[in-house]
């Protein structure tokens, strides 16, 4: 083999190595970006030493404990959830591990993103919880994309006396919203559905479920292909009656929903605090 041919082969090999390294770096960067997007969106100090007797169904011994729903950016694999994955930090710096965690009651298909932490997390008056840390592996349930890990992420705690708000709105595929769940269903004439997720469970101040008046209070922004915008109320509300923090907004138009709003002062959380004003973009 002459010198020039040998040298050309060496150059080609080096270039191949650089190209392969570039692919590896690019894939690593992509995975890192995905990992960084996996995070808790909210932690809501919903009840202080006041979980009802019925909470024992969710976790034996939960009656009279604290309840804190944590909403995550992605749905999670239930098998990856352990109480030891979470740590609650109080104002004093003291830390607590939940006695148990559960995805119930928000456990219908495609709802597995609200983790209810149950245990003793401090007292609202003198040493409230201020931060939730995810200290071990909590994995997304993705099957058609890289599995994400929430380990190492954290979120500030919304105080006990703060009202609930919408933290997430997302378009729901028809093969999901057409399924029967524990809550009510959208009408058969529905053309698209947006799921809204609140920081905690919400009902009317008299503890009844939402009705026609609250349907009209929901406002959905629509953006057509030509850029024109309009605003409607959903034709119906669904996912009611299942005691979780999700609602379906059933729309009778195919014009894509781009934002959802709900005004302050009409709904309450389990602690009786009125909801805050909310407006969020729709995730697709």
Image (cartoon, helix red, strand yellow):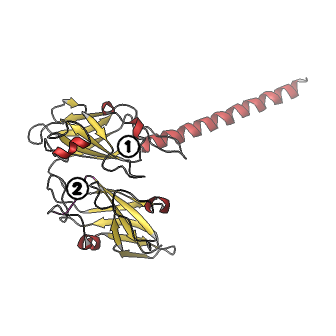
Give the farthest residue toward the right: 1
Discs 2, 1 touching: Cβ within 8 Å: no
Residue 258 in the image: state x and y as whole percent. 41, 66
Query: Which part of the image, by quadrant, shows the N terminus?
Result: top right
Where residue 13 sits, quadrant-wise, is: top right
Question: In percent of the image, x 37 and y 34: which residue is there?
Answer: 152
Q: Which residue is mark 2?
A: 164
Residue 136 in the image: state x and y as whole percent. 37, 31
Q: Is residue 150 magenta?
A: no
Q: Which residue is mark 1?
A: 39
Where residue 53 sits, quadrant-wise, is: top left
Residue 55 in the image: state x and y as whole percent. 21, 44
Marker count (numbered):
2
**Lower position in the chain sequence, tag 2 or tag 1:** 1
The numbered mark at residue 245 is none
Check disc 1 and report its element: helix, strand or loop: loop
Q: Is residue 152 above or below residue 33?
A: above
Q: Is residue 104 above or below residue 246?
A: above
Question: In percent of the image, x 33 and y 74: which residue is there?
Answer: 233
Left/right of residue 267 with respect to residue 40 in the rendered view: left
**CA neighbours of label 2 inside 10 A, class few (<14), some (14 to 19), many (20+):** many
Residue 216 in the image: state x and y as whole percent. 28, 74
Determine the CA span between mark 2 and mark 1: 19 Å
**Span shown in magenta:** 199-204
Give the main secondary structure of the magenta stretch. loop
Question: In percent of the image, x 21 and y 30: which residue is there?
Answer: 95
Left/right of residue 223 with respect to residue 234 in the rendered view: right
Check disc 2 and report its element: helix, strand or loop: loop
Question: In percent of the image, x 40 and y 61: which residue is there?
Answer: 282
Give the farthest residue toward the left: 125
Select label 2 or label 1 by which is in front: 2
């Amino acid at each position: 083999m002459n010198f020039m041919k040998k040298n050309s082969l060496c150059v080609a090999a080096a270039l191949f190595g650089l190209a392969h390294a570039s692919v590896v770096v690019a894939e690593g960067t992509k995975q890192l970006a995905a990992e960084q997007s996996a995070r808790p969106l909210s932690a809501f100090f919903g009840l202080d030493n006041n979980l009802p007797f019925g909470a024992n169904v969710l976790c034996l011994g939960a009656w009279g404990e604290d309840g804190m729903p944590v909403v995550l950016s992605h749905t999670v694999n239930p098998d990856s959830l352990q109480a030891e994955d979470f740590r609650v930090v109080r104002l004093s710096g003291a830390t607590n591990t939940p006695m148990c965690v559960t995805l119930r009651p928000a456990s219908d298909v495609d709802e597995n993103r609200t983790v209810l932490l149950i245990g003793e997390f401090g007292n609202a008056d003198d040493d409230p919880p201020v931060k939730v840390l995810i200290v071990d592996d909590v994995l997304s349930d993705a099957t058609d994309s890289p599995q994400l890990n929430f380990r190492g992420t954290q979120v500030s705690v919304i105080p006990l006396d703060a009202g609930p708000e919408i933290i997430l709105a997302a378009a729901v595929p028809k093969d999901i919203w057409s399924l029967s769940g524990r809550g009510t269903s959208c009408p058969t004439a529905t053309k698209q559905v947006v799921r809204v997720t609140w920081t905690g469970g919400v009902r009317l101040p008299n503890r009844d479920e939402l009705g026609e008046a609250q349907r009209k209070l929901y406002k959905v922004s629509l953006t057509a292909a030509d850029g024109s915008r309009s605003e409607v109320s959903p034709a119906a509300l669904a996912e009611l009656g299942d005691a979780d923090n999700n609602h379906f907004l059933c729309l009778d138009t195919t014009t894509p929903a781009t934002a959802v709003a709900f005004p302050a002062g009409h709904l309450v959380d389990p602690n009786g605090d009125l909801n805050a004003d909310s407006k969020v973009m729709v995730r697709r």
